Image (cartoon, rainbow, N blue to C red):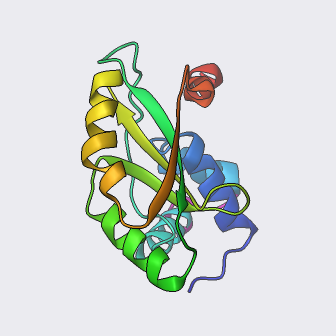
C-alpha cells in the first residue's frame, strides 16, 4: 500500500478535474519537475491508486443517457448474503457502480440506460434476479450537475 502525501493528493485532485492535462502543467501546479511528477503518477498507477482513465461523454453531443440510481435492500445482511450478492453484481457489466452502504439500504448501484424500456429490461433480467434481494428502489436522474465542471474551467 502506497502512503499518499500532500503532493500525491494534489496530483489526484488535478487529474480528477482534467486527466488530459499535460505533465508539464501538472508538474508546475504541484511544484515538481516534470520527470518527478511523471514518476509520481507512474507509482500511483502501479500501486493501483490510479486504476485507469476514462472519457466523460456529453449526453447532448451523443446518444441521450440516463443514469439510474438503485437502492437495494437484502433479505439478510450476513456475510454469505453480501458475498453472493457482490459476486453476482460483478457478473453484470450493465451495473456501472456498486457501493455497500450504511443507513436505509444495503447497496447503491448505478446503471446507464437510453430510456425507460431499457431500464425495464435491466430490472427484469438483472436486478430482480440478484440473490437475496428484498427490495429495489430506483431513481432516474434528470441531469449530471458536475458534468459541466470541466467546461466551466476552460
Residue at the (26%, 63%) spot, across then down:
91
Where is residue 127 drawn, in percent x and y? 36, 50
Occupied quadrant, residue 20: top left
Residue at the (57%, 28%) spot, across then down:
150
Given residues 67 and 145, the one toward you in this image is: 67
Q: Does residue 55 sit above or below 64 in this rendering?
A: below
- For the image, the number of numbered tags is 0
- The quarter of the image holding the N terminus is bottom right
Residue at the (48%, 75%) spot, across then down:
82
Q: Does residue 151 sit above or below 127 in this rendering?
A: above
Occupied quadrant, residue 37: bottom right
Left or right of residue 152, residue 40 in this image: left
Provide the residue span drawn in magenta.
Answer: 31-36
Left or right of residue 151, residue 91 in this image: left
Where is residue 42 drawn, in percent x and y? 44, 70
Left or right of residue 119, residue 7 in this image: right
* In magenta segment, residue 32: yes
Where is residue 133 drawn, in percent x and y? 45, 60
* In magenta segment, residue 57: no
Residue 34, visible in the rendered structure: yes
Residue 47, visible in the rendered structure: no
Given residues 116 and 98, the one toward you in this image is: 116
Where is residue 130 drawn, in percent x and y? 35, 60
Given residues 30 and 69, the one toward you in this image is: 69
- The quarter of the image holding the C terminus is top right
The furthest residue to the top: 60
Given residues 123 and 58, the one toward you in this image is: 123
Residue at the (59%, 62%) spot, across then down:
106
Q: Does residue 77 sit above or below 89 in this rendering?
A: below
Occupied quadrant, residue 111: top left
Amino acid at each position: 500500500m502506497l502512503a499518499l502525501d500532500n503532493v500525491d493528493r494534489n496530483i489526484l485532485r488535478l487529474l480528477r478535474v482534467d486527466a488530459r492535462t499535460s505533465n508539464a502543467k501538472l508538474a508546475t501546479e504541484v511544484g515538481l519537475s516534470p520527470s518527478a511528477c511523471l514518476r509520481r503518477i507512474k507509482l500511483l498507477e502501479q500501486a493501483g491508486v490510479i486504476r485507469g482513465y476514462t472519457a466523460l461523454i456529453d449526453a447532448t453531443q451523443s446518444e441521450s443517457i440516463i443514469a439510474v440510481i438503485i437502492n437495494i435492500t437484502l433479505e439478510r445482511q450476513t456475510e454469505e448474503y453480501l458475498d453472493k450478492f457482490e459476486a453476482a453484481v460483478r457478473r453484470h457489466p450493465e451495473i456501472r457502480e456498486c457501493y455497500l452502504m450504511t443507513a436505509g439500504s444495503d447497496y447503491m448501484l448505478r446503471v446507464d440506460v437510453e430510456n425507460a424500456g431499457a431500464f425495464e429490461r435491466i430490472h427484469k433480467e438483472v436486478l430482480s434476479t440478484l440473490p437475496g434481494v428484498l427490495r429495489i428502489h430506483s431513481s432516474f436522474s434528470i441531469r449530471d450537475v458536475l458534468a459541466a465542471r470541466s467546461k466551466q474551467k476552460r
